[in-house]
Amino acid sequence: MIRKFDSENFKWDGVDTLVYKQDGSPFKDVTRQVLYDGAYDIPCQFRYFECLPGGYSTLEYHEHTHMVMIGRGKGQLLLGDEIYDVAQGDFIEIPGNTIHQFRANKGDYIGFFCLVNKDRDKVKLLTDEQMETLRQKPKIKEFLEGLRVHGHRFDWPDYLVFASYRGD
Ligand code: MN
């Protein structure tokens, strides 16, 4: 099986792009494509996620491990209690029970491939108490609230963000 790659739009033939709901959710402007849904001897899912500039993945933790490779663009990763700059080609292991979130806060998309076991525990969101603990670190507080790009804040209206994304 071969899924041909459309490099202009970062899409693969025959793969649906799922756009997450925007309202009342702990993520923003994220799409998901499931490239491979496992086989008997490799029981894993291979997905591609993408955040538009200013978007971010869910702030979460869980028992299962992620194997991640940045496929497009750049941004930042909150992993545990540290913030890391990440960019295309970087390889990342997100160990079990480690808080993580990707943010496209460097003026670019961030797209990443993510391998997970098909059989995995459910995502856990942070409690108010856990959020408070995280915010005590100034760098993390800025990461969670700032969305600063070269000193400027991202405050594009949603319609503009989506207009810039629509390639089809
Ligand atoms: Mn996760």
Image (cartoon, rainbow, N blue to C red):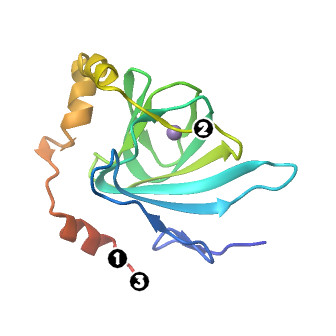
Q: Residue furthest right?
A: 41
Q: Residue 105 at x, y = what percent?
A: 28, 45
Question: Can you identify the residue that label 3 sits on?
Answer: 168
Q: Secondary structure at mark 3?
A: loop
Mark drawn on residue 66 = 2
Residue 104 vs 20, above or below: the answer is above
Q: Quadrant of the N terminus?
A: bottom right
User: Residue 10 location in percent, x, y?
Assistant: 50, 68
User: Is there CB contact under 8 Å for labels 1 and 3?
Assistant: yes
* Camera-nearest residue between 124 and 166: 124
Question: Who's the residue at 39% across and 48% down the image?
Answer: 74
At x 55% / y 57%, what residue is drawn?
A: 48
Element under disc 1: loop
Which numbered circle lies on residue 144?
none
CB under 8 Å between discs 2 and 1: no
Badge 1 amino acid = Arg
